[in-house]
Structures are given as C-alpha cells and as structure tokens.
Amino acid sequence: MILRLSRIPYLRTAVQLAFFIAAVYLFLNLDYPVSMPVDNIFLSSDPLVALTSIIFYRGAWIPALLPVIALLAGSMVLGRVFCGWICPVGFLVDVSGAFSGIFSKIIKRRQTRARFGYLQYGILAAVLISALFTLEALSILDPFVILQRSLHMIWSSAGIPIIILLLLAASIVIAPRFWCRAICPTGAIIGAASLISPFGLKINEDCIKCKKCHRECPTGAISGEMKWDATACTKCLVCERVCPKDAISFSASVPSISSFSTSRRSLLAAGAALGLFAVSKGAVAASSSGKPIIRPPGSLVEYSFNAACTRCESCARVCLGNVIRPAGLDAGIDRYYTPVLDFSTGKCERCGACGTVCPTGAIISVPEEKIKIGTASVDTEKCIAWKDNLKCLICSEVCPVDAIKGVKNLRPRVIPEVCVGCGACELNCPVDGVKAITVSNAGERRREA
C-alpha cells in the first residue's frame, strides 16, 4: 500500500505553520551581530530581489546568490513546492482563503477558478523591466518584503499593514490564493523554474471526470478541461485528497514546457503594469518633499537610494544603536518608510549591520574611516554653556571621534571635518525639547553606485 502524504491530516498546515513561525522569529530577532544569510534566510533566498538587483546595478553589485540558487534548484526538481509548503505569505493567504467559500455563500456568488497566469507573468515582466530604473515595485509586490514590513509595523506599532491586509482580503473576496495565482512575481519565477520538474500530475484510468479536483484546486492549476499547469501547481495535494477514486498522483514524468503560455494578454498586462508604475512614480515624484533627512552610513545618493530601497525594514530591526526608523509622510511619499536616522532614540554605532542585511545594496557596510553621516552643529541660543555660562561639555565627553572641543569658558565647538555625524552628542544633550546640538546631513558622504 502506498502512503499518500495527502492522507495525513493537517500535515501541510503544520509544515506551513512551522515555517511561518520561523520566519516571524528570525525577523523579530534580527539583531547585531548578524550572520547572513542564515539570520534572514527568506529574504536572502528571494529570486525576485536577486534578479531585479542585478538588473538595477547592471551587474555591478551582486547579492549572495547561493540561497537563491538552492531555492530555484529545488523548484526545478520538486516543482513549486516552496509556495505550497514553505512560503509564510502563502500560509497566510491559505488561512484567509479558508473563508472564501463562506463569503461566496453570503453574497451568493460562485468562486472564480481561473488561473490568471497571464496577469502574473505580465506583472513579473513589468517588474523586471522597471528594475532597469527602480526597485520600488518590490515594496508592494515582493511577498517577503511585504511580510517583513508588516511585521515591523505591527511589532513597533508604526502603522497599519495595508498591503498584506489587501492580499489576504483578495483570497476571501476574489478567490483562494488569488495573490499566488494572479499577482506574486516571486511565485512566477518559481513557477517558471518548476516547468522542468520531473514530478508531474498523473490521472489514471479510474478517473470518472467528476472535476472535483478542478473545483477544489486553490491555485487554478487544473482547468475545466482537466489540463494541468505546472507553473501554477504548488503540490498542495488537495486534488489527491479530494479525488473520490484515488485516480490522481504525482510521479516522475517527462516535463512538459507546453504548459507555459506567453499569451497576448500577458504582454498587455505587462504594458498596463508598466504604465501604472510610471504614472504612480511620476505622481509621487511631483509630490516629493525637499526636507533634508539623514541616511544610514554606506547609503547610495538620495535619488538612487529611493530607487534601490525596498522598505523591508531589515536595517531598522538589526540596528545596534536603535537609531534607524522608517521615514514618515512628512519626508514625502516617495521616501515614505525608507530608513532615516532619528537621534532622539539612539546613536549610530557605526557597526555596519544595516549594510550587512540590506538585500539590494541600497546600504552597504563601509570602513569606519570612510563613514560621514552628517555634521553636528551647536545652537548657542539653546546651549546652556553658551547661554547660561554653565559648565557643560557632555557632548564633548560622549563624542567617539573627539570632534567637539571646549573653548572660551568650556563652551562646545564642533570641528566639522572631524565629526562623523553619529548623533551621540544630540542624544545625550541635556537640553529639553529641541536639543542645543543637532546633526544635519551637511557634509554627508554617499555612494554613487
């Protein structure tokens, strides 16, 4: 008797839950010192982040590719198993999708069973083309970026994770796993790799053509004509479990590339997505704020930084000095939720952790002697040593590079060419409210590429 995994109750759910807990644990415990890619294995394994980063930098900056290669190699052998058994976002949309049937009964509407593959591969094409200029599309379309930012928002009470709530709602309102079958560009890459998997769906002569497999498939991988789409199948084994005659199984077979279709609708979807990206980018740029902000050490110049940052919040989680936070809307929509330094909460330890965990090279680790985040300046109208003639050189005492000297009756003065802008002085200034010594981005040293 052959043991079918589909017959083991809740096996896949248990595996998915274990990987989801692991993903949450790893991100929330991302801390200095970091060991990449182990400490952030999900984002490090993301083929979409890796591929778009290579395109964006024209090959001048290459991410760690070993985890990505391992994921794609596994998909070439087993198929799109990652999406069905491991992906933490896939687990969440499965949970929300369980309510899809209830919702359909309430509104008295049949659930859609369409694959929407043309849309998914159109979006992937649009993301890859737009990567020639920007990686910002990843902030709303990459599942691991969305998950990490949502976790950070929830954990730090920094906002409402709207995007992940929308994709969960789509699984209820439109179709189970709508995100996975119609939108997710990362899943599209894994699906394309799955085309050469030797493990395909087999339907034997016991099939009675009841089409229950078609109706129950959560990704639309089995059509009404009983044709199987390898790019959509996540090997969830639902079809095996619901088949009344045990006529369905997955076994070794010759891969069928014919299941991949580059239809005209895919090209139209790609064009529409590119147009939407361009219009939204133009609208956001038009409403941009010119407010000066301070970036982590090793950051790209501002325009390139905004284009390369995915807003994944890895740098904020790992920051040793607790100084990195997401930018608010006051910084402009184009810079919303990109990392900025807030010296009211900490100081930059110049540890390089933010550059270590950045998946796209928007921030890289640079030698300490090359770090120049900004420059501190003293407001003599607020400084108690200047204003009240009190003896105070706390800023000088905490400065790690000896860039603040006491002159004229111990009144602090900043040496701009020595100051690295770490914010230790601003953090420790005893003046209430707006500090007497503050750091600006003046003199900052940023990377061109």
Image (cartoon, rainbow, N blue to C red):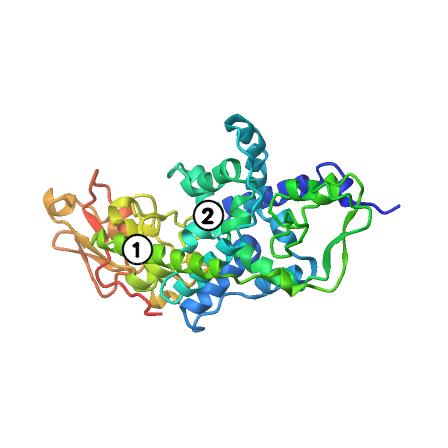
Q: Nearer the viewer, residue 74 or 370?
A: 74
Q: Is residue 34 visible?
A: no
Please tell me in which quadrant of the rendered image residue 192 appears. bottom right
Decide: few, some or many residues near mark 2? Use Cα within 10 Å; few <14, some 14-19, many ≥20. many
Q: Is residue 388 left or right of residue 221?
A: left
User: Callout 2: helix, strand or loop?
Assistant: helix
Residue at position x 68%, y 50% from top?
Answer: 226
- Residue pushed farthest top? 106
User: Callout 1: helix, strand or loop?
Assistant: helix
Give residue 213's position: percent from left, percent from top.
Answer: 69, 43
189 in relation to 143, above or below: below
What is the number of the mark on residue 102? none
Q: Is residue 82 visible?
A: yes
Q: Is residue 378 left or right of residue 252?
A: left
Give residue 253's position: percent from left, percent from top.
Answer: 76, 61
- If you read the primary sequence from the N terminus, does the residue marked by circle 2 or circle 1 appear first? 2
What amino acid type should be assigned to the residue bearing mark 2? Answer: Ile
- The residue tagged 1 is 279
What amino acid type should be assigned to the residue bearing mark 1? Answer: Val
* Figure quadrant of the N terminus: top right
- The residue tagged 2 is 146
449 in relation to 324, above or below: below
